[in-house]
Image (cartoon, rainbow, N blue to C red):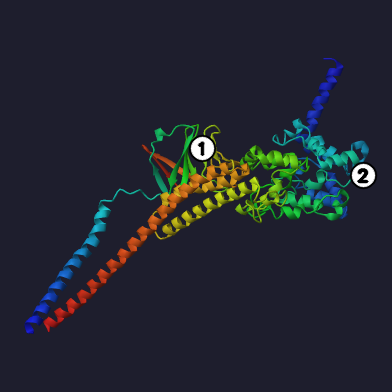
Amino acid sequence: MNLDGFSRLAGLVLLIVSLSPSYLAAQQKPDNCVGCHTALGDERLAEPAKHFAEDIHATKGFGCVSCHGGDASDAEMSAMSPAKGYIGKPKGTKIVEVCGRCHSNARFMRQYNPALRVDQVTEYYSSVHGRRLKESGDPKVAICSSCHRTHSIRPPSDPRSSVHPLKVADLCGSCHAEAKIMAQYKIPTDQLEKYKKSVHWTLLSVKGDLSAPTCNDCHGNHGATPPGISWVGNVCGQCHVVNTELFDKSRHAKVFVQMGMPGCASCHDNHQILQTSDEMLGLSEPAVCIRCHSAEDRGGKSAAAMRTLIDSLGKEYDKAHSILLKAERSGMEVSQAQFELSEAKTALVKARAAIHAFSVVVVKKEVDPGLQISAKAHTRGLKALEELGFRRRWLVVSMAIILALVGAIVVKIRRMERKEQ
Amino acid sequence: MVQWSMGGIVDRRRFLNWFLGTTAGAFLFTVFYPISRYLVPPKVQESTSRTVTLALKPADVKFNTGQIFRFGSQPAILVRTPAGELKAFAAVCTHLACIVQYRNDLNHIWCACHNGHFDLNGLNISGPPPRPLEQYVVNVRGDQIVVSKGA
């Protein structure tokens, strides 16, 4: 091996050793940064040191110098000399660079979290935030520390994290809901208010379903960008697969693109996505079809027909369900009928999804079997109630016989007593 | 007059005796009938509120298949996993209560209504279902498959 090869190998060994957790842990002992910053009595200087102990980086053995550079073993001001790699308080692109030094290094990150993505920096520079920072040097755009904080960084799964699903909406809203901050960008500030009226926020905040979408699930997190009109359906389709597939095959899919309408959001809105109901379909308020269709055109007639089908199945299902419930509460055995009626419920849910095909034939295909099942279950419920009436009538008859028997016994006893006298 | 009165008393007495005898017989019948039906029970289905014995033999349930059965008034699904284990779950999707089914091409449980996916432990792994499916206990007793709700 020549000298050049040897120096390369030595450099590689040095790099691996310098990146090992034990080396990093050894580097921060003794940690004079925390010692001085907490002892100086200046709250502004003490604040970062106080919070950093709970930061995920501290728990993995990283110290102040891992980001700020310098020498933690030096108790003098010389610890913060540029000669020792001290970079001070990074700002703007420098912060992205500092975070990316480790987070974009697949080999390095694998040691701590092999499943963690390492393309955050690339994604960030594809976002509106990143593009503005890079292209126009806008100092107000969000950077890593705007969302993840600086010295109390925790993983998103930690409820105390600033990027926990329950906190993301307010986090984004801390800038996007502020008219003063957004004024120069000329973008609306009502997204947070609208989102908090949506079914997604209700699922997330009230039902505690952390899989319900928040800002980053539709806009991307590091690559945050508004979804394009032509691909908004793909975003919704991540969860609403069946509805999206039906919509994509429908005539509306092409027409919406031609008209510049944002797919799903045309009827369901984008941020204020409310709980859907059958009333959204048809030709009277609050139906969404009337935004484009009238009672006279073909689409309007289809909408009215689909609504009639859905309503008919809904009513027949409710009728059968309530009569079976009444029979069950009266003590009748109707479990087989209830079991069979659950197929009608499935048919109703499928029919509601099928309206995204915007075809009466497709909806009817789901509704018809449901109607048959409901009718059969309703008949069985009626029979159970008839049987209940029969039993009650004969209970009255038997009670009358018993009472007559009691009366006859009384008369007989009296007669026997009189005879004895 | 006396004869008439005596005849009336005799008739009433006979009627009362007949009535008492008949009703006493009916009373005894109502007492002994349930006892006899208890001793010789009719062929009715067992209560399926907590336990159900399936009309299936374990050997008839093929690997990587699932089938719906009635558990009380609700649908449930019996699955034989590709590894051969028998498992049972409530077949009601936790999203909007559609009946789920087993997909042998996916090797897991699937809901056709909104494309919800559940793994072979009943866990919701994809799509809109917010919660796992309720899992039941499956016991094989000889040639019988008995499914019951956990404690």
Query: Is residue A73 shown to the viewer in this render?
Result: no
Q: Which residue is mark 1?
A: B102
Number of marks in the image?
2
The answer to whether B76 is drawn above or below residue B33 in the figure is above
Point out the residue furthest to the front here: A296
Going 85% across and 51% down the picture, which residue do you hit?
A182
Near-viewer residue (B104 or A211)? B104
Q: Residues within 10 Å of mark 2 (few under 14, many from 20)?
A: few
Query: What chain is tagged by disc 2?
Result: A
Q: Secondary structure at mark 1?
A: strand
Going 75% across and 30% down the picture, which residue do you hit?
A107
Q: Which residue is mark 2?
A: A77
Mark 1 → mark 2, Cα distance in angstroms: 68 Å
Q: Residue A1 sits in which quadrant? A: top right
Q: Amino acid at mark 1?
A: Tyr
Point out the residue furthest to the left here: B3
Near-viewer residue (A323 or B44)? A323
Near-viewer residue (A288 or A81)? A288
The answer to whether A160 is drawn above or below residue A19 in the figure is below
| Labels 1 and 2 share a subunit | no
Q: Residue A410 sits in which quadrant? A: bottom left
Q: Residues within 10 Å of mark 1 (few under 14, many from 20)?
A: many
Query: What chain is tagged by disc 1?
Result: B
Q: Secondary structure at mark 2?
A: helix
Q: Find residue A293 and report its horizontal and vertical position in percent.
A: 68, 49
Query: Is residue A419 shown to the viewer in this render?
Result: yes
User: Any mark on residue A253, and which?
Assistant: none
Rendered-image quadrant of the C terminus of chain A:
bottom left
- Taking the image as shown, residue A134 lies to the left or right of residue A376, namely right
Q: Find residue B4 and report its horizontal and vertical position in percent.
A: 9, 81
